Image (spheres, rainbow, N blue to C red):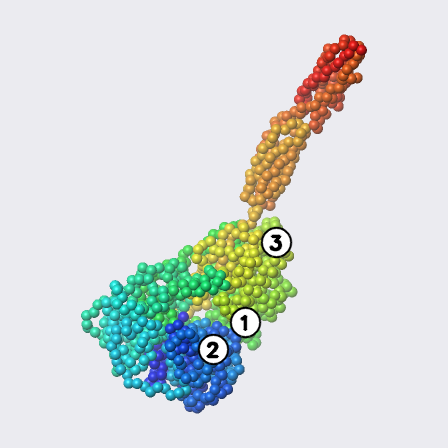
Amino acid sequence: MLSNSREPGFTLPSARRLAATAAGLTLVCSGVALGAAPAQAAADHLVISEAYGGGGNSGATYKNDFIELYNPTASAVDLSTWSVQYRGATGTGAGTVTKLTGSIAPGGHYLVQEAAGAGGTTALPTPDATGTIAMGGTGFQVWLSNGQTALTPPASKVPAGTPGIVDLVGASSGAYSYETAPAPAPSNTTAVTRDATGTDTDNNSADLTTAAPDPQNSGPAAPPQEPTTVDRTIAEVQGTGSASPYAGDTTTYVRTRGVVTAAYPKGGFYGFVIQTPGTGAGTDATPGASDGLYVYQTSGGVGAKVGDYVEVSGLVSEFSGGLTELTYDPSDTRSTLTVLPDAHGPVTPLAADLPTTTADREAHESELLDLSGQRFTVSSNYATNQYAEIGLATGTTPLVAPTEEYDAQDTAAIAAATAANAARAITLDDGSSTNFLPFGGGANQDIPLPWLSPTNTVRVSSAATFRQPVVLDYRNNTWKLQPTHQVTDEGTDVVTFSDTRAENQRPQDVGGDLTLATSNVLNFFNTTGEDYVAGGAGRSCTYYVDRDDQPVTDDTCTPNGPRGAAQADDLVRQRDKIVAAINTLDADIVSLEEVENSVALGEADRDDALSDLVDHLNTAAGVDRWAFVPSPPASDLPPTSEQDVIRTAFIYDPATVQPVGVSKVLVGSSAFNNAREPLAQTFKPKGAPDRTTFGVIVNHFKSKGSGANDGTGQGNANPDRIAQAKALAAFADQFTAERGISKLFLTGDFNSYSMEDPVQELEKAGYTSLESDQADEWTYNFSGSSGSLDHVFANAAALGDVTGVDIWNNNADESVAYEYSRANYNATDFYVPNQFRASDHDPEIIGVDVPGFPAVDTTTAATSSPMTYGTDGSVAVQVTSTEPTTGTVTLLDGTTELASAPVAQDGTATISVPGTALTPGSHDLVVAYSGDDSNHASQAPVTVGVAKATPTLALTLTPRSSIPKNTRAGLDVGLTAPQQTVTGQVTVQSVNGTRVVQLTDGSAAVDLGVFKQAGTYVVTASYGGSDLARPVTRQVTLTVTKK
């Protein structure tokens, strides 16, 4: 996101052909506010003078894309062995070649026609060469080669003299290759263009700007026409299309009138906004055409102030991607500015919701809007510390990356979400084009940055409330809201922002017996760039520098060097923020990403940087709060040459958790040739049984910044991340089997939004992505949209143990201005050694319930059924607990154990009481639960009643039950009862009298005497009972016959 800056005396991009005859006029680079600059000399070689990729697209005039060359030298150049080559803005491969023929004359142009689109109304001038490349409308990389073999320019800055490349243009902020810095992004209605003299300072940002396409072939230019002046209303100047009908017409001066609604005498805009009197409220008299117009003044400051009613004349152009503007040039006698004394109607700010379509916004371009009644939310603050721009979204949430919410393969849903984001997006600017960053020279870094302050942090998701009207503006292919004056402070008179830091001082409580978190620490190296360079021959580093030209962070260290702090004091600032963030995170286990891999830098101890971080964490905590999991032995790691300079790691609280076994790294998987291999470790609560062990695997997948683009909208290297997800799932299965565990968590930076293919691969493998309990929380913000690249996954066995999830928004929502790497970048020092902007990713933390640890209290209840002595009885027991139960329950008589039984998981048990364990009577006993690893012991009283047994009385008459008279009879008596020998006496009654006998071994023989008379006689035997047996009586009948 660039802002356009122009100093007085500079020409308009659309007038670049005229500029060749206007001495002393040149162009200024987009996005950099400069002081008066010396004129740049023309290049001594052919240059790409214009490139356009919007041909045939919506709103385009020309039907074809094109690349135009210019020869600023004094000699003709033979092009028969030359070519122009192209790749998309983010492309990394070899270019697509269009071969050239013929030659280009000194001071001449050469037009290369490329592919046509379905739209457009005008054919290009007759091309000098023709290709078939469909160029990108909003960005590309094109280069001119003195050969015809496809070349592959390197990433980022392509130095002058690169073999085969005569000139290169990288257009759009995301361009993979460029000269020094990228040119601004073109559009369907604008081309990337160089000044008419062919200036080439090997800086695309400085040498090129955007303007309406103006292709020229090798033929002669059309003869100039005599200028004229016409009177037009502002609406007539604007027109109803995407561009003014007068744009690019260098022979027609337009004169119009309006009330000045905004003025920018400083800061690089050097202009003012006018609007037709009486507009803004009521019925729109010019529907489809705006009543506002931007006026650029080339010199002499700004000749109008807010409230003036002015008449102005000048040339009309579409500046910076499509802003209709009229140029007032005091040095041009046909261009005039007059403050009028005439009475006029007021301009009333339009009180309505922000227009959402391009057409509706065009219809209100440069008009004054009252947005105080609409809710806006900060969606991006990445460019705030450079251009003081703030990305806003209408509504109550920031823009969300489409693949965060919709299946990446659902192209219709993705397209709809992308369109919805575009309709909601708008950029709040500061009324200037000042570049506040220190690189590139100049004194802008000594100007206090607007909007931001140590207390006005303007975080993503903050609510924005407009307090003053603003102007709807369009610059750098972006719709913007400009205050009516340049903002030089917090801007609270224009807009205020809610403070969301207060609610994010620390993570939300996620419950659980333990907490597990993942945290990307943004290239934490305890080896600084300066240390690395001093550590060996052949080492070098380039740096990002502060406003005193002091190194702050490493840019590039070769060969394969550190990526963190540049100097010792920078390391202190970085480490202090990381320490504050991790200690505030306060998790029991933290997986870390982007930690220095010390052995990859030539050090002996792979864990050196990790150990250093833990030492400083403990110093800040005041106790030994943290320990780290050591790396596996070198024999269990990939060769050092195959390891990245950043790695993953685990730290933990030794007071609450302990590692089980050694850590394990996935070795030998080709899927991770361009990423960090997964690191696995098993843990259990401190002092807990091994059955509570669970596993964690920390990951850092391939980034989206480079690699093959599969065209699915999921960034570069998506196929690589898919392969890594599959390899991770297989590794996880192997690890759980080896360690004999069932519960596993996957953590880390997966570089994949929540609905992208790699996440879906892990979900197919049985893992669930754990989302925050709080609505609208994400771990990352990129290109104005929020989404989660960082995740915690749980397998099915672990999922039920998760008690809560929180994404702690302490980093990604913050402006990069608060990062350690921006210390002393601006006159306002934003650095504070606190937990905010310790990284560019937000941590995610989950609560984990460890079933049965620590042990919980239980209650025991018991009931018994009546028992009979000698017959086994039972006592029913219920142990109540919040955890599954094991162990035993024991029936106690004092200290004597009478019986026991195992306890089921639901707490039930039945104690079988032996029939002889208790004597008849009532017994007050105790049932004691033994407890287990998960449950404390408990006990309960129980009363057991035991009744005497009822014996079985067996009677047998001897010699038989029927005898003749005068025969002696006898009775055999036997008493039996379960589990006892019946004792005591038996009384036998008959006609012959009563006899009492003592039982021996439960039996007795009784002499009944001689029965002299025939008849039937009843013999009754009565047992009197004992301590263990009840009394019992039985009768038998004796028959006595006559003979």
Where is the N terminus found, in terms of image quarters? bottom left
- Residue to which mark 1 is pinned: 561
Where residue 666 appears, as percent x and y from the top left, is 61, 63
Q: Residues within 10 Å of mark 3 (few under 14, many from 20)?
A: some
| Residue under the image location 78 percent in, 10 percent down | 1042
The three-letter amino acid code for the residue at tag 2 is: Ile
For marks 2 and 3, give the one nearer the viewer.
2
Q: Residues within 10 Å of mark 1 (few under 14, many from 20)?
A: many
Q: CA distance from mark 2 to mark 3?
A: 56 Å
Where residue 344 appears, as percent x and y from the top left, is 21, 69
The three-letter amino acid code for the residue at tag 3 is: Ile
Q: Nearer the viewer, residue 121 or 975?
A: 121
Residue 430 relative to residue 306: left or right: right
Res. 133 mark: 2
Residue sticking out furthest to the top:
1013
Q: How many marks?
A: 3
Residue 929 drawn above or below residue 642? above
